[in-house]
Image (cartoon, rainbow, N blue to C red):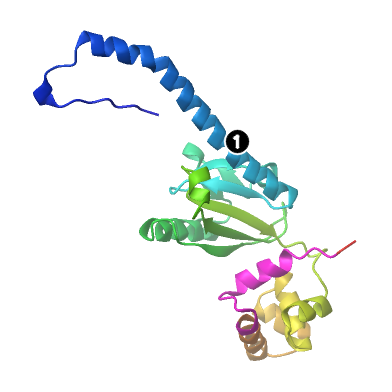
Amino acid sequence: MIFAVEKKAATGPVTASSIAYLDHLRPHLARAAMMSSRLEFERVRAAMDALQIAGLPAAVLRADGAALALNDLLEQMSPRITMAAFGHVRFQNAAANDFLSRLLEQSRIARGSASGSFPLLGVEEGAAAVVHIMPVEGGARDIFTNAALFMIVTPVDRQRLPSADIIRGLFDLTPAEAKVARELATGRDVGAVAGHLSVSKETVRSHVKAILSKTGMPRQADFIAAIASIRPLK
């Protein structure tokens, strides 16, 4: 943090007494700056801890993609998600990095109002997931002054996905649509779903279109994330 104290050139040079007065204020300004910075950091950490309690890996990002803070769940996703040079978020999957770069550029052009989701394919180190990038807007800007974006990861746990009947009831889908929805949530693509359900790819695509229309979600990845976030009662 830099404090710049200026005066008009027409009023002459800065006097020794003025410099002495500013030197007297320097430790007070330093303490105030440190306390302000610490308060913002603690607020960011509190937000990350809250998402951790909800079981969601998350980070707060600057506009350039550098992480201001991240929770332990996100750190545990290494090497799939790591912090590169200067604290920038990097994915093991090249396509995911491309998605993030495009969203950061859209956010820059839209002055922080852009958002989006993209898939993170499953590997030996972990299951598939959906990454959500959301802007820090409204009153949150007053709390997270240097933050531009939230990054939240929704793991797709195939062992904990709700049944087709539950999905049908929650989203008012037909039995066929609910089956397709659950198959997609397991990580299968359209071709694999068609083969598993013994239907054509065109039929699966038609069901996907109906699902998105009924749920009001613009993209398949958003719907899969919604299903993945459902945790059945024990």
Residue 8 is drawn in which quadrant? top left
Q: Is residue 183 found left or right of 47 in the rendered image?
A: right
Q: In the rendering, at what x and y percent does residue 63 appear?
A: 44, 49
**56 up-or-down from 156: above or below:** above
Which amino acid type is marked by label 1? Answer: Glu
Give the residue at mark 1: 42
> Which of 109 and 88 lies nearest the eye of the viewer?
109
Residue 234 is drawn in which quadrant? bottom right
Q: In the rendering, at what x and y percent does residue 184 appear?
A: 70, 75
Q: Residue at x 57, y 64 (%)?
A: 118
Residue 229 covered by magenta stretch: yes
> Which of 83 and 11 lies nearest the eye of the viewer?
11
Q: Residue at x 53, y 50 (%)?
A: 140
**218 up-or-down from 90: above or below:** below
**31 up-or-down from 47: above or below:** above
Span highlighted in magenta in the image: 213-232
Helix, strand, or loop for circle 1?
helix
Residue 99 covered by magenta stretch: no
Q: In the rendering, at what x and y percent does residue 47 appear?
A: 63, 45
Q: Residue at x 67, y 70 (%)?
A: 224
**179 up-or-down from 55: above or below:** below
